[in-house]
Amino acid sequence: MEQRPGAGARARYWFDTTLARGTSALVGWLVLVCLAVVVPASAALVWTSGHAPATLSGKVAAIWHLTGETMRLGGTTGSPARVALSVLLALVALVYVSTLVGLITTGLTERLIALRRGRSKLLERGHVVVLGWSEQVFTVVGELVAAGANQRRSAVAILADRDKTAMEESLQSKVGPTGRTRLICRSGPSADPAVLALTSPATADSVIVLPPDASRSDADVVKALLALRATGRGGDVTVPVVAAVRDSGYLLAARLAAGSRGVVLESDTVTARLIAQAARRPGLSLVHRDLLDFAGDEFYPAAHPSLAGREFGEALLSYGNASAVGLIRGGVPWLNPPARTVLEPDDQLLVIAADDDTAELADCAPLVDERSVAGPRPPDTRPERLLVLGWNRRAPLVLREWGRNAPPGSVADVVADEDEATVRAACDGGDSGDSGGDGGDWTCVALRGDTTRPETLAGLDLGSYDSVIVLGQEPRAGEPPEEPDTRTLVTLLVLRHLEQRTGRELPVVTELTDDGNRPLAPLGPGADVIISGKLIGLLMAQISQNHHLAAVFDELFSAGGTQLHLRSAADYVVTGHETSFATVVAAARDRGECAIGYRSRAEARRAPGYGLRLNPPKADRRRWSEGDEVVVVAGEGRRGAVRSGGLPLPRRTPRG
């Protein structure tokens, strides 16, 4: 037999039922509870007071007066009509005050929620706007903070379709203290012109549109650029823009949307070229990283009218604490011009210096020791052997870029868990129809295998390879998601084990996605690690601060033309002797190159510089050894070869 609920349960049920009737029931219960407390307490105060009325009616009136004062009901005594009017006025006043407090509280709450959501408009000028949220945001913001360290006040506005508080917390944990630079986060889709207008892009110094984490979302970059056009005057982008896309299919659309003042990077192409360059000359990634961040020396324009009429070759030895690498003529940078080029009055020199105002003139020609200049040596045309472990969408680009400068007879072995026909098609130029990687006389061998398994790599003759490239594998459709760098780290671990068994340490170029995994990579000190997202972020931050650098980096990272190189110090100076860096600069000048630094073999494994020294003073003297290398800005790796190829940035030809 079912047990009947007790009196307490029935009372609670009745109470809950009355509360469910709405606001009137809530108000009624509130009044009853207050009266149940206030009336007995008022009666106790009246009865225990030494000045209480003598009569019962007087005491009741005193209780009513005290209750009315406590509950703000007036407390007027007299006829019933008079008491009712007093209560009515008190209730009206109470409703008015309560409503006013409620309206103020609601307004403040809505305003705080709006601020928390990041939907208020910025009233800034000269700030930098960052649109989107991807792996590059922390690098870009961190570099902008470093660039604004010597400014009185600077601001960076970040607009992304994420929670404002979450963005602020992530930036605070990853970027750290921002000094004088204020970070302002706004929440909303960057492709909405109304939301984009909250960041005041028309008054900004520049706008950076970050590439998405997935290549299929490159359309979002184009939409953000179109929204930027919609917020500009006359339907055009009126502010300098730096954007990046991963898929080359969106490159033209993004450049058209960015307008004449926009620079659009093809991030996969740039990354592939940096990987290929580092594979041919180990340690080159350290040079790229040093020049791209704001922590060390960067490219700056320097105006010194006193050098007008002199030759560029003389200007190379006219700075004691800066390294000239080119000139800016008619607003167009010109890297490594011929030494006989005469400087015009309106020319600016392009120098590598610690800051934009630190390049000082100094005659360094007397520091050159002609006796220490080395004679010419025949170029090394020995065929190279490259081992590529892994496969992703950038692998075909890496192979073709490596093959452009590979000496005849070179071989690239590709070991990947990928269909061999796909690898062969990529090596043969794919849809472009080129043979052997853009016409180069080299061979590609496709080998099917899992690079994370020791038996796969154990079957290779690792000691016969000149360099190794380890690429991260992208997730495939239907497979469970995996942290992108996991397979890369496992491959490196197996490779390191086999190196120890063979007794030879190979030059390895590793591509990672997350910069946080760099300390986990089992690599030797100073190894070449390409963090694709970080490099693109550094590049975008540099161009956003100086748009002249777009053409400079275009040339440095292009498939042909002037590039950065690490070359043996024995090509420039007599090894085993002490001489100044000015002597190295003079020797490089005689070879049609600009020397900007060196890498010491003895310190190649010592952090944090790993032997690399960019822009050393010309007066610095050191004993050069056979293993030392000189960093130069020069033509392609195979001297005398002149090639052309597609560029990730719009190329402009210097005049004059």
Image (spheres, rainbow, N blue to C red):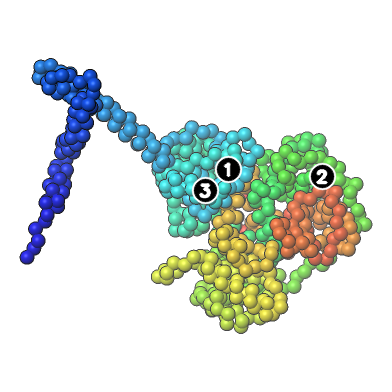
Residue 523 image position (x, y, % from top left) = 65, 68
Quarter-of-image position of residue 452: bottom right
Three-letter code for the amino acid on which mark 2 is drawn: Gly
Residue position for label 3: 171
Residue position for label 1: 178
Mark 3 or 1, nearer chain start:
3
Q: Is residue 511 above or below residue 296?
A: below
Three-letter code for the amino acid on which mark 1 is drawn: Thr
Mark 2 or 1, nearer chain start:
1
Outermost left residue: 1
Quarter holding the C terminus is top right
Mark 3 or 2, nearer chain start:
3
Q: How crowded is mark 3: few (under 14 residues within 10 Å), some or many (20 or more)?
A: some
Residue position for label 2: 320
Going by the image, does 2 lie left or right of 427? Answer: left
Q: Residues within 10 Å of mark 1 (few under 14, many from 20)?
A: some
- In depth, the one of 99 and 299 nearer the eye is 99
- In depth, the one of 179 and 279 nearer the eye is 179
Residue 275 image position (x, y, % from top left) = 62, 63
How far is mark 3 from mark 2, CA to CA? 39 Å
Quarter-of-image position of residue 266: bottom right
Does dot 2 land on a helix, a strand or a loop? loop
The reply to whether dot 3 and dot 1 touch (C-beta < 8 Å) is no
Residue 84 image position (x, y, % from top left) = 13, 21
**Residue drawn at (70%, 73%) of the image:** 505
Q: Nearer the viewer, mark 3 or mark 2?
A: 3
Does dot 1 land on a helix, a strand or a loop? loop
Residue 589 image position (x, y, % from top left) = 82, 53
How far is mark 2 from mark 1, CA to CA? 33 Å
